[in-house]
């Protein structure tokens, strides 16, 4: 926390704006809009998941439809497809960014079309803050006229060729969950290309109440709006977003400098034109055994580390859906480890983590 959050929360209490609307909601939205730039419109919502759900609804995704989704991601990227009674189709990653592979994407689209179902949308994810190959993904999407939902939950503050992640899809989503680069405890946002689309999202997120003196509904609505209290936390957090990005990047640089001569550890580099917020610092080990033994060795030292996201095509709940694979996300899951990455890690803690990892490699 920056310390500024409490003054916005106090203001909400003093003015009795304790509701899912109010000055903090409007203020947080306009802060995000100025940060993102590019004429985008922001609707503050209860979560990133609800933002994904609303974008699918607004794209008309329904029962029997198919939606393409990056396989290597957190389950929240894919769950809303199933909420809509549609089926996810999973696409594997490429090695340069660990995100959706443009070649596999085109293979998947062609194959789905040949089977008689054209996918209704593509959900691409900037994993761990590293932008996906935006130009290449958009080129394929455009070729087949399929809209892209940009899952930017992990990548606020990242840039692709100078443009902000969160402004690169037909719809984009952000998350302010407790673990993200900035947090409102829980929360999210939908980023749209027009004011009308934002208004439509806010309408759906506030129970789809029609304009009438009584309660009138001609559509199914949702209770997905952000609370004015929570938005107050968001306004305070916007003041430290850039410093959090700088800190996460310096964590990553610290690990990189410490291990660059260790030939059993490799890092994901930023391709030319990519700027990652380095939400999490991840490394790849030389084998699954090394990854797991290192994780356990760190655990013994009371240092938590975690394997990278287990791909959706390997999840029991999603196994039955079609997937287009090249082995990359499976390999990343086997060899990858997320190191402690918090914005509040101290130099001493970073030193201790590096010492523990070095100690592991001395004995193994
Ligand atoms: C966190 C996350 C979400 C979901 O956001 P919530 O605000 O937690 O609902 C979606 N996609 C990815 C890639 C995430 O990391």
Image (cartoon, rainbow, N blue to C red):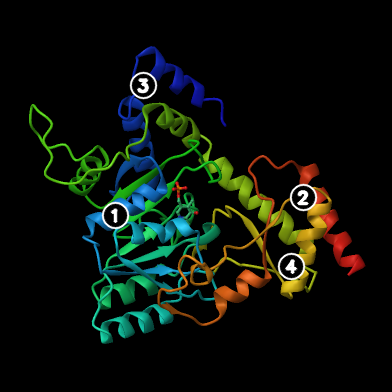
Helix, strand or loop for disc 1: helix
Q: Position of residue 258 (x, y in %)?
A: 78, 59
Q: Where is residue 194 in the image (x, y as percent from the top left)?
A: 21, 50
Of the two numbered discs 3 and 1 on the same chain, state the one appearing first in sequence: 3
- Number of numbered discs overlaid on the protein picture: 4
Helix, strand or loop for disc 3: loop
Q: Position of residue 154 (x, y in %)?
A: 50, 53
Helix, strand or loop for disc 2: loop
Q: Residue 284 carries which label?
A: none
Which residue carries the number 4 mark? 291
- Estimate the spatial distance between the alpha carbons at disc 3 and disc 1, rounded to whole Å: 27 Å
Of the two numbered discs 2 and 4 on the same chain, state the one appearing first in sequence: 4
Q: Is residue 42 above or below residue 61?
A: above
- Please tell me which residue is depicted at 43% across the width and 40% down the height of the picture: 187
- Please tell me which residue is depicted at 75% across the width and 66% down the height of the picture: 292
Whether ligand 1 has any atom under 8 Å from the Cβ at mark 2 is answered as no
Of the two numbered discs 2 and 1 on the same chain, state the one appearing first in sequence: 1
Q: In this view, does 34 lie above or below 212?
A: below
Which residue carries the number 2 mark? 303
Q: Are marks 2 and 4 in contact (CB under 8 Å)?
A: no
Q: Is residue 327 left or right of residue 362?
A: left
Which residue carries the number 1 mark? 55
Which residue carries the number 3 mark? 18
Which of the image's four quarters has the N terminus? top right
- Please tell me which residue is depicted at 67% across the width and 39% down the height of the picture: 344
């Amino acid at each position: 926390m920056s310390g500024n959050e409490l003054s916005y929360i106090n203001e909400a209490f003093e003015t009795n704006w304790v509701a899912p609307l109010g000055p903090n909601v409007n203020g947080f939205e306009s802060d995000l809009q100025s940060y993102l730039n590019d004429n985008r419109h922001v609707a503050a919502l209860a979560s990133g998941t609800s933002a994904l759900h609303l974008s699918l609804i607004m794209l008309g995704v329904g029962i029997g439809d198919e939606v393409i989704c990056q396989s290597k991601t957190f389950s929240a990227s894919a769950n809303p497809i199933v909420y809509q009674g549609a089926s996810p189709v999973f696409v594997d990653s490429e090695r340069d960014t660990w995100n959706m592979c443009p070649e596999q994407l085109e293979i998947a689209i062609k194959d789905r079309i040949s089977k008689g179902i054209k996918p209704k949308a593509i959900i691409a994810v900037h994993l761990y803050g590293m932008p996906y190959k935006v130009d290449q993904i958009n080129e394929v999407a455009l070729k087949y006229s399929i809209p892209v939902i940009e899952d930017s939950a992990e990548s606020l503050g990242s840039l692709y060729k100078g443009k902000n992640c969160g402004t690169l899809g037909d719809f984009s989503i952000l998350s302010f969950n407790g673990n993200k680069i900035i947090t409102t405890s829980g929360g999210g946002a939908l980023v749209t290309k027009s004011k009308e689309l934002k208004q439509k999202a806010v309408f759906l997120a506030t129970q789809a109440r029609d304009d009438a003196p009584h309660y009138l509904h001609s559509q199914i609505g949702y209770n997905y709006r952000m609370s004015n209290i929570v938005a107050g936390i968001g306004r305070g957090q916007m003041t430290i977003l850039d410093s959090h990005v700088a800190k996460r990047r310096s964590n990553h640089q610290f690990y990189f400098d410490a291990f660059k001569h260790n030939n059993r550890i490799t890092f994901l580099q930023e391709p030319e034109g990519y700027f990652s917020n380095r939400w999490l610092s991840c490394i790849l080990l030389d084998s699954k055994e090394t990854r797991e033994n290192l994780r356990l060795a760190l655990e013994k030292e009371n240092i938590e580390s975690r394997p990278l996201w287990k791909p959706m095509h390997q999840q029991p709940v999603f196994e039955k859906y079609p997937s287009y694979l090249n082995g990359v996300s499976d390999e990343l899951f086997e060899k990858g480890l997320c190191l402690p990455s918090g914005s509040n890690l101290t130099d001493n803690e970073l030193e201790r983590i590096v010492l523990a990892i070095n100690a592991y490699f001395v004995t193994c």
